[in-house]
Image (tube, rainbow, N blue to C red):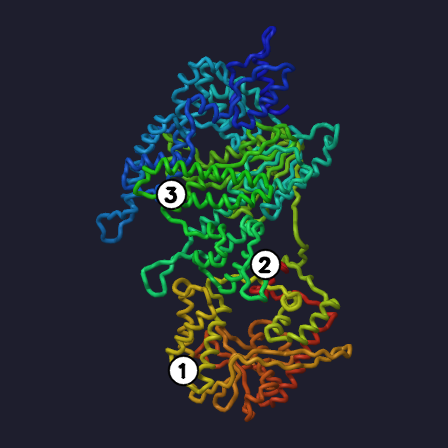
């Protein structure tokens, strides 16, 4: 028999029916922790009689207090405005924007002060004096005799000086309107319990059922009724955590056993031993991430249903099962993880509006408006143009509702030519942003791209920062435009979200209009409007309509109070989630909170409350599954460790159960098996199938192979396969700041332009020409990037300095002659295979510059990074096709450039001048040219000998590439994977 069954039987038996009448509960009250517990209690009570009778007044504690106190709870946003009015009277200079930053925290403190009946005057005087001492203890600069307070410091200390006045004024305002916040209602009833309850004949008998940690107001209410013999406490206690003084779950209960009224001699009969004597099996399951917990829970429940005696028509009822979500954001994933056959369930939680697709769109819009950047006009006028950041624009365009709206309305781009086909409009806009590299976009540009569509005009409209009603009106228009999307999807939940959000906007608009006189002179800004709206959203959820006696219950930890289940699955049993992390938002320092004359609750009290809920849930359960994440980053902020409750079960509860509790700890793993000692997969390879070989031959014969691809094959053949055979590439995106590759492309293009415009015609290049060309090339290469601020400005300064230094060195080469820039060379090489087949392969490369200096031809490649080359003493014929690493990559690049030039560049060298190759490194500009170390015999080898040896080395490499018996393999050198685009695919990240 579970706890509420026992309670219902006890209450029923204490009020027997009289002769010829049914049981009488006219003036009997049963107060429980939650409304869900009330529903279950009434169901259990109704089963005890074969004839109808009037039930007692069963209520949740919050409902009982507000009704008995005769007040109505005020909503949070209205309470914020009331508090602002209070502070505006106290301090007319208070700024609304700053007030919003700390008002919610202050209201939480007021609530706790009233819940625990703290002497407010004493507390606030104490706090004011403490802050005064803090001001005196501020460390003064050397030589200073006094501290000159800043405006911010003055506002900070003035806030604490005004708290007492604000507290009493808020009480007075709310009392005059018959309103109260939760803690105020509790205090009101606790201080007037005699006239509100004791002297009221409607309260003949009150039962307080299933409580644990009582606030001081609750305990005073209950004690007053107990002393007058008008109340009875019904506890749900287990001896395991009551007797063990180190067990935090029994912290409050041990205090009550010392109280002669809250816990009487009769209550001792209610102490049970179910935790250690009732047979139960506990499984502790670890999974890699938070969302995977729901999959495991769904599978376990499916297995339970399949093995249950009640599975099928005519069977016994299914055992009561609860899935408890310590992290309530897992509700939607949990519902999706349940088997499709699960239709009979009760959800004692609401779907939070914060988890809806609609809210994600609204949140993105607020974030986009918050990050609007204003630019000065190019002509120097004092006019700022607001622009939206492309990331938020793309995020809005990709939202499911916006995408669905575009499909329903067949939004297509306008072709720019007769040959061009129309494309989906939203895709076209994103392609244009990517192509033009637009980091910031104006309203006009977005409207033009969107063909002035109504939805896009509504989404990409600059909100006024101090006119909240206009912003709300824009959100109304958004809802109206999206209505067709909701109707088409036929999603009942999303339609309900739409209705609820619409009503929230109406509530917010009404509140702002009613309080307009309050904020006169201190306008409600975009930031404060967002805080108001989000506070309403936080408090709003869509309740589920379902049957209370369903075999499966999905609920949060607080909803389990006073309820029992035979089977329990608890998710997110991780430290920092269960119990929650040790943090408490409060303006009252901890040392003041724990003062004996104040005694506000601390995080230790909250942890003991959570511990009680956890162990009480296990008391009568027979099957328990505790699921936690094994990744330290699953929840962030150090919440990856298994909860201490798991360790307590393992080392304390199980040993004390004398075999009644069995414990198992399976670990769920997902993904491929890892075999290496370093935990990495070393056996991943791709065979060269006939299809792969055919693609390889075609690519080598048509597209050819370049130095980058050749280096990629040598360093990691699997990376070569992904990129050159499978054709996998990273998705392009707009880059707000220059990367290393783009920085290099910019400088390369600048040097190319300088060579083509001036040096190849024999014209001198001045430093001013370098500056001008650098700026023009930036506009061409970087397109929509912003140069005026941030890291791009710093990189621009670096680039200008490097280019000017390079120009000064170039000016020292009096006989410099540039004979080629960005020239592309391609040769065809026949590669004989062991099968006798000869495969033609194109070898290509693009040379940055070819110059003639001091009687020799120099093949130049520019590098913006550091350049290291292997020693010239290395055995190039053996090592060149085998060695991996950056310095060998660069050596092979110069080697191939020299080979290509000697093979195809005769017209550039009609006088057969000596040919060398090297790098100009902008990182080491004073070092001059770093020459190619690749020689195959001696430094005096002939061009023909170099060509012959090079082709022999190339054929060796290409035969490996075309060998069907050598699969593409992942490299064993982990440093190669550091910047690889495919490291996540092969498990190296």
Q: Residue furthest top?
A: 19
Q: Position of residue 402 (x, y in %)?
A: 53, 50
Residue 830: which quarter of the image?
A: bottom right
Closer to the camera in the image, 786 or 673? 786
Please report the residue visible at 50 percent of the width from the left and 91 percent of the height from the top: 855
In three-dimensional space, the C-alpha distance between marks 1 and 2, rounded to whole angstroms, equals 47 Å
Residue receiving disc 3: 101
Q: Which mark is residue 153?
A: none
From this viewpoint, is residue 895 visible?
no
Locate residue 193 relative to residue 695 in the image: left or right: left
First in residue order: circle 2 vs circle 3: 3
Q: Residue furthest left?
A: 145
In three-dimensional space, the C-alpha distance between marks 2 and 3, rounded to whole angstroms, equals 40 Å
Residue receiving disc 2: 989
Helix, strand or loop at label 2? It is: loop
* Mark 3: few/some/many CA within 10 Å (<14, 14-19, 20+): few
Locate residue 642 relative to residue 185 in the image: left or right: right
Please identify the quadrant where the C terminus is shown: bottom right
First in residue order: circle 1 vs circle 2: 1
Q: Position of residue 350 (x, y in %)?
A: 54, 36
* Mark 1: few/some/many CA within 10 Å (<14, 14-19, 20+): some
From this viewpoint, is residue 358 visible?
yes
Q: Mark 3 touching mark 1, by CB under 8 A?
A: no
Closer to the camera in the image, 213 or 86? 86
* Mark 2: few/some/many CA within 10 Å (<14, 14-19, 20+): few
Q: Closer to the observer: label 3 or label 1?
A: 1
Locate residue 480 relative to residue 468 in the image: left or right: right
Residue receiving disc 1: 765
In three-dimensional space, the C-alpha distance between marks 3 and 1, rounded to whole angstroms, equals 59 Å
Helix, strand or loop at label 3? It is: helix
């Amino acid at each position: 028999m579970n706890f509420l069954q026992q309670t219902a039987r006890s209450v029923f038996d204490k009020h027997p029916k009289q002769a010829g009448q049914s049981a009488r509960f006219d003036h009997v009250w049963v107060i429980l922790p939650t409304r869900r517990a009330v529903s279950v209690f009434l169901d259990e009570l109704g089963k005890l009689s074969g004839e109808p009778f009037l039930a007692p007044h069963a209520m949740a504690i919050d409902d009982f207090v507000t009704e008995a106190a005769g007040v109505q709870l005020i909503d949070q946003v209205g309470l914020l405005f009331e508090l602002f009015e209070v502070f505006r009277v106290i301090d007319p200079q208070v700024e609304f924007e700053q007030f919003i930053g700390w008002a919610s925290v202050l209201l939480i403190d007021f609530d706790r002060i009233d819940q625990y009946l703290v002497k407010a005057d004493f507390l606030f005087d104490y706090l004011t004096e403490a802050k005064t001492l803090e001001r005196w203890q501020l460390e003064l600069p050397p030589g200073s005799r006094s501290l000159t307070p800043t405006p911010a410091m003055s506002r900070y200390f003035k806030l604490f000086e005004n708290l007492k006045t604000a507290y009493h004024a808020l009480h007075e305002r709310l009392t005059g309107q018959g309103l109260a916040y939760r803690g105020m209602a509790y205090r009101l009833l606790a201080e007037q319990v005699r006239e509100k309850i004791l002297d009221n004949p409607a309260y003949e008998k009150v039962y307080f059922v299933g409580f644990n940690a009582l606030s001081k107001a609750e305990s005073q209410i209950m004690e007053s009724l107990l002393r007058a013999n008008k109340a009875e406490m019904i506890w749900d206690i287990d001896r395991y955590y009551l007797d063990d003084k180190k067990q935090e779950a029994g912290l409050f209960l041990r205090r009550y056993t010392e109280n002669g009224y809250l816990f009487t001699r009769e209550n001792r009969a209610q102490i049970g031993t179910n935790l250690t004597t009732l047979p139960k099996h506990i499984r502790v399951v670890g999974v890699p991430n938070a969302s995977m917990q729901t999959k495991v829970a769904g599978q376990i429940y499916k297995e339970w249903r399949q093995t249950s005696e009640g599975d099928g028509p005519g069977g016994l009822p299914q055992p009561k099962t609860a899935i408890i979500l310590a992290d309530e954001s897992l509700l939607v994933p949990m519902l999706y993880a349940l088997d499709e056959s699960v239709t009979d369930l009760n959800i004692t939680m609401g779907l939070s509006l914060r988890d809806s697709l609609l809210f994600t769109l609204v949140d993105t819009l607020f974030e986009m408006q918050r990050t609007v950047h204003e630019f000065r006009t190019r002509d120097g006028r004092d006019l700022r143009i607001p622009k939206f950041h492309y990331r938020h624009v793309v995020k809005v365009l990709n939202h499911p509702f916006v995408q669905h709206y575009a499909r329903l309305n067949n939004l297509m781009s306008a072709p720019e030519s007769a040959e061009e086909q129309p494309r989906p409009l939203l895709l076209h806009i994103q392609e244009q942003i990517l192509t033009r590299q637009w980091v910031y976009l104006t309203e006009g540009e977005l409207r033009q791209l969107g063909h002035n569509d109504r939805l896009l005009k509504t989404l990409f409209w600059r909100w006024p920062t101090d006119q909240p009603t206009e912003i709300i009106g824009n959100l109304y228009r958004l809802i109206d435009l999206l209505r067709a999307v909701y109707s088409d999807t036929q999603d009942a939940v999303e339609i309900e979200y739409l209705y609820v959000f619409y009503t929230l906007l109406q509530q917010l608009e009404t509140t702002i209009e009613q309080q307009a006189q309050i904020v006169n002179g201190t306008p409600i800004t975009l930031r404060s409007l967002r805080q108001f709206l989000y506070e309403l959203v936080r408090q709003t959820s869509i309740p589920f309509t379902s049957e209370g006696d369903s075999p499966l219950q999905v609920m949060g930890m607080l909803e389990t109070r006073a309820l029992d289940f035979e089977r329990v699955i608890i998710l997110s049993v991780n430290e920092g989630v269960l119990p929650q992390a040790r943090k408490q938002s409060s303006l009252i320092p901890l040392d003041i909170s724990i003062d004996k004359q104040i005694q506000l609750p601390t995080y230790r009290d909250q942890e003991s409350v959570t511990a009680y809920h956890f162990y009480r849930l296990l008391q009568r359960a027979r099957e328990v599954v505790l699921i936690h994440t094994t990744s330290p980053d699953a929840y962030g902020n150090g919440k990856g460790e298994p909860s201490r409750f798991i360790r307590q079960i393992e080392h304390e509860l199980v040993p004390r159960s004398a075999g009644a509790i069995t414990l198992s700890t399976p670990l769920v793993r997902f993904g491929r098996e890892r075999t290496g000692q370093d935990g990495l997969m070393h056996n991943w390879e791709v065979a060269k199938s006939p299809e792969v070989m055919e693609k390889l031959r075609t690519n080598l014969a048509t597209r050819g192979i370049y130095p980058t691809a050749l280096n990629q094959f040598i360093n990691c053949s699997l990376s070569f396969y992904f990129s050159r055979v499978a054709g996998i590439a990273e998705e392009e995106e707009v880059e707000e700041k220059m990367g290393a590759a783009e920085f290099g492309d910019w400088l390369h293009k600048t040097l190319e332009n300088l060579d083509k415009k001036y040096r190849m015609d024999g014209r001198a290049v001045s430093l001013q020409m370098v500056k001008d060309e650098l700026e023009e090339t930036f506009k061409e290469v970087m397109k929509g990037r912003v140069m005026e601020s941030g890291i791009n400005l710093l990189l621009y300064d670096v680039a200008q300095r490097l280019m000017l230094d390079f120009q000064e060195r170039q000016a020292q080469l009096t006989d410099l002659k540039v004979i080629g820039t960005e020239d592309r060379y391609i040769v065809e090489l026949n590669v004989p295979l062991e099968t006798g087949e000869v495969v033609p392969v194109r070898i290509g490369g693009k040379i940055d510059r070819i110059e003639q200096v001091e009687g020799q031809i120099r093949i130049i490649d520019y590098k913006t990074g550091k350049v290291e080359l292997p020693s010239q003493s290395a055995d190039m014929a053996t090592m060149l096709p085998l060695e991996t690493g950056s310095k060998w990559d660069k050596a092979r690049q110069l080697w191939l450039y020299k080979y290509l030039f000697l093979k195809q560049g005769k017209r550039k060298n009609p006088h057969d001048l000596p040919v060398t190759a090297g790098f100009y490194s902008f990182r080491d500009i004073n070092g001059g040219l770093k020459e190619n170390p690749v020689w195959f015999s001696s430094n005096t080898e002939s061009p023909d000998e170099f060509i012959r040896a090079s082709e022999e080395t190339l054929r060796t490499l290409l035969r490996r590439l075309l060998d069907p018996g050598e699969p593409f393999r992942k490299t064993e050198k982990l440093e190669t994977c550091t910047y690889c685009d495919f490291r996540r695919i092969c498990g190296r990240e």
